[in-house]
Structures are given as C-alpha cells and as structure tokens.
Image (spheres, rainbow, N blue to C red):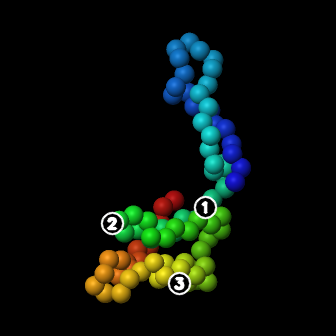
Amino acid sequence: MPITFRRSLLAQPRNSNTYARRRDFFIRGQRYSILPALSLDGILHLDVQDRPYTSVTFTQFIDTLLDNMNPFPQKNFVVVIVKWSVQ
C-alpha cells in the first residue's frame, strides 16, 4: 500500500513556514469498501476492498464470518445485518 505525505497546519509554530508531516495510507480520490463484523468483545471479521461489494463477495464475507460464529447459547451466535450508507 503506498504511503503519501499530507501537510497539516495544526502543529506549526507561530510565524513559521514549516509544516508538520503525517503519513497517510489512503490516497486522495481512491475509494474503499469496508465491511466489518463487530461483537462486544471486538472485531470478528473485517474485509476491505478497493471496489464495491457484489453478491458474490458479500456471500464470501458471510461464509468466512460464519467460521468465527458459535452455536447457541455460546457467545457470537447471532448475526445482525444493517445497511448503513456513508457518503
């Protein structure tokens, strides 16, 4: 994954032309699709793609997630799917 540098004026001393530098791993203009599976104990499964999800890739995500699930009455036995669009 390429590393880019971005300028920030927040950490600069007064009357100074120096800039604070911070490494960024995401490139401007490139979009990512992030699909997490969360529980109260943490992240069960996480998938990041540089393309939108299709029914095939979503089904693959669910198949992989089900490997981390447990039968009733143990922890992590319920899956709740919420469509949340962030733009």
The residue identified by callout 1 is 32
> Which residue sits at x=31%, y=87%?
72
Q: Position of residue 4 (x, y in %)?
A: 68, 42
Examine the rendered structure and indicate whether residue 12 appears above or below residue 48.
above
Label 3 neighbour load within 10 Å: few <14, some 14-19, many 20+:
few
Which residue matches tag 3? 63
The residue that mark 2 highlights is: 40
Amino acid carrying label 2: it is Leu
Give the amino acid at mark 1.
Tyr
Residue 6 to residue 70: above or below: above
Q: Residue at x 53, y 84 (%)?
A: 63
Q: Earlier in the sequence, mark 1 or mark 2?
A: 1
Residue 36 percent coordinates (x, y): 48, 68
Which of the pair 75/29 is nearer the observer? 75
Q: Residue at x 40, y 74 (%)?
A: 82
Q: CA distance from mark 1 to mark 2?
A: 25 Å
Residue 61, quarter of the rendered image: bottom right
In the displayed structure, would residue 77 be above or below residue 8? below
